[in-house]
Amino acid sequence: MEWYQLVVLAVVQGITEFLPISSSAHLILVPHFLGWVDQGLGFDLAMHLGTLVAVLAYFRTDVARLGVAWIQSLTRGRRDEDVRMAWGLALATLPAIVFGGVLGALGEDSLRLPGVIATASIVFGILLGVVDWRAKRVHDTPAVLGWRGYLAVGLAQAVALIPGSSRAGMTILGARAFGLTRPAAARLSFFMAIPITLAAIVFEIVVMLGSPIEEAWGQMGVAAVLACASAFVTIHFFLRMLQSMGMTVFVVYRVLLGLLLFALFGWSG
């Protein structure tokens, strides 16, 4: 892989991972548009690692608090809001892991088509906008979510395995449907990214160990750093942006992107 390709893909991953516009779609589409070969599993692993470090670093205080709460729930029988959220995040991760295993067994390549990406971008983008615009209840903390709420948002996250639907977009959609404010929904989405990204990294490591391939470790390191830096900045500005605006700009972007894909590639590309 050329260095300029590495820089572009790593920055695209970092920017799109936590925005409701689908990072997987952009990582499929950018090489498709520019005629680049697939970046490979090792590069995906490096970028996932970079975005994981970014969200852990940005929310380090919250992550540490929830981690301590989870451990103390096992060792001391602690029961409070932080414990409920820690276990809720674990519950919300299960649907995506299960669906991901099923999808992997069936072959996810059948979904990596411009038509599928375009349809998911448009349909789920409009749905995100409708839910965001109609949401009336305003809760500033995920504490209002019971186990049913976490499971429902987890199911929404599992739907995001369809390229173009967006993991961030689907989790924000689910959280807004349960009455969380935009900043609270976004924070929950960031927290949910931690266990599912970690699960993706473990899966990619297992696959790489099962069929060793030569990787450019220097390039992987640079990709991880670039993805981390761009993701960290994106998280900061996305949270600030939500204080003054909603999902409209992302909805419009997704609809235009979907229409452009249909115009250029039709259904199968």
Image (spheres, rainbow, N blue to C red):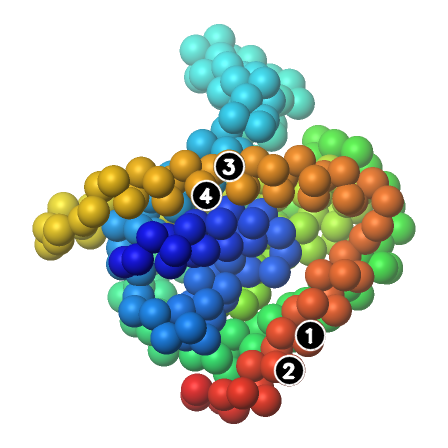
Q: Is residue 98 visible?
A: no
Q: Which residue is mark 3?
A: 229
Q: Which residue is mark 4?
A: 227
Q: Give x and y (percent) for residue 221.
A: 31, 38
- Residue at the far top: name it: 76
| Circle 2 or circle 3, nearest the eye | 3
At x 25% / y 40%, what residue is drawn? 218
Q: Which residue is mark 2?
A: 259
Q: Give x and y (percent) for residue 46.
A: 33, 44
Q: Quarter-wise, where is residue 41 in the image?
A: bottom left
Q: Quadrant of the C terminus?
A: bottom left
At x 79% / y 61%, what residue is drawn? 248
Name the residue type under label 3: Ala
Name the residue type under label 1: Val
- Circle nearer the N terminus (2, 4): 4
Secondary structure type for disc 4 = helix
Q: Which residue is mark 1?
A: 255
- Circle nearer the N terminus (1, 4): 4
Q: Is residue 172 visible?
A: yes
